[in-house]
Image (tube, helix red, strand yellow):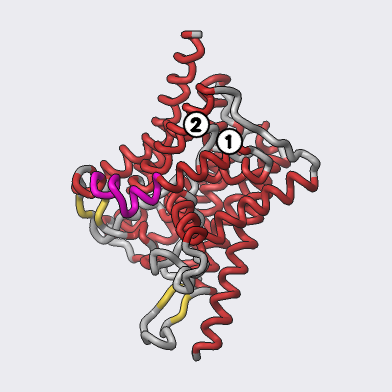
Amino acid sequence: MDSAAFQSLYHTVVGAAFVVSALFGAIAHRTHFCTMGAVSDIVNMGDWTRMRMWIMAIGVAMVGFHGMAALGWIDPSQTIYYSGRVIWLSALVGGALFGFGMVLGSGCGSKTLVRIGGGSLKSVVVFFVMGVAAFATLRGITAVLRDRTVDRVAFEMQPGSPLSLWLAAHLGWSATAALWIGIGVGFALIVWAAWDDGVRRSPQAWLAGLGIGATVVAAWWVTGHLGFVPEHPETLEPVFVATNSGRMEALTFTAPMAYTLDWLIYFSDQNKLLSLGVVSVLGVVAGALAHALATRTFRWEGFAGTRDTALHLVGALCMGVGGVTAMGCTIGQGLSGVSTLSLTSVVAFAGILLGAVAGLRFQLWLLERE
């Protein structure tokens, strides 16, 4: 592959990533796909419908990821989730902080972008604060704190952190068997999610579960198959085109918010190219905006008052710090990461759910004080 062909592929990958993320934004806006909402429905009403939508999306993403690996389309070992070093404390603490923050901030990172597309000005504020906090936790003051505390607590898991790979290895099975374990677990989650009458009879639930899960699978394919170049024309090394990590990536939104701010601030710097993360952020907003305008549901929204503003600022700060510490948000760990069956991702998602429950209890305490 020469340089011209590589540049052409770069633009194809970036364009494909934008389309995938725009579809995510449109579907999320149409179906009200939201982790915070799903947890809130369970805690406040005992309604599992939206959580079943989430579980179905995880199942679809899991089947797609392991299925493509079984077909040889992608190499599952080329993701950040396959590291044998399990940073369980970072995942748990960061996840809990993120989950608590998403309740105060009226939704997680992806929901924030969707709400921006729907006309929420307070979500714009959340985006900027969350992005700055994420950047600081990637490279700034909170990054130093993270590195010197929770990131140092870990253990090694051989041959890798995916539970399917670990189980297959301890049973004496092959790596191929591990892929079939992942496919089986994914199908089981889909069946469980669809077992409920309310889900089976709801086109919206099917659209959310199948559609959101499919966008994660598509993102894996775009970066891991379409965007994989065995030999870079200049460095002669394997490369995953347009990824920030240099490895195969799927949808995630905390660190990409920081990358987006960096790209906007240093736009004139020719070295600041559009990456998958930046394009995903822009795509979700564009997709949600397009759907909101098409359905005439676009509405301007601002803060209700001083306390509302303060809660959203604290929530955004918690999400920015927590999301990077946990190596992902509800989408980055809860969907993309869990689709690989990474133990770190499972712990992070559990932390997010626990943090969300704590956030809802905190909100209830605030209401009772009024």
**Is residue 141 magenta-colored?**
yes
Let me know if residue 65 appears in the view: no
- Whether residue 186 is situated above or below residue 180 in the rendered picture: above
Q: Provide the residue designation for mark 2.
A: 312
Residue 266 visible within the image: yes
The residue lying toward the viewer, choosing from 298 and 169, is 298
The residue that label 1 is drawn on is 122
Q: Secondary structure at mark 2?
A: helix
Which circle's residue, 2 or 1, is located before the other in the chain?
1
Question: x, y percentage for residue 133?
Answer: 39, 44
- Left or right of 150? Residue 117 is right
Q: Is residue 62 left or right of residue 87?
A: right
Q: Main secondary structure of the magenta part?
A: helix
Query: CB under 8 Å between callouts 2 and 1?
Result: yes
Q: Is residue 12 above or below residue 22?
A: below
Residue at image point 34% right, 42% down: 347
User: SS at mark 1?
Assistant: helix
**Label number found at residue 241:** none
Above or below 107: residue 261:
below
Residue 258, image x, y percentages: 44, 53
The picture quadrant where one finds residue 145 is: top left
Q: Is residue 365 magenta?
A: no
Question: What's the magenta region?
Answer: 133-145
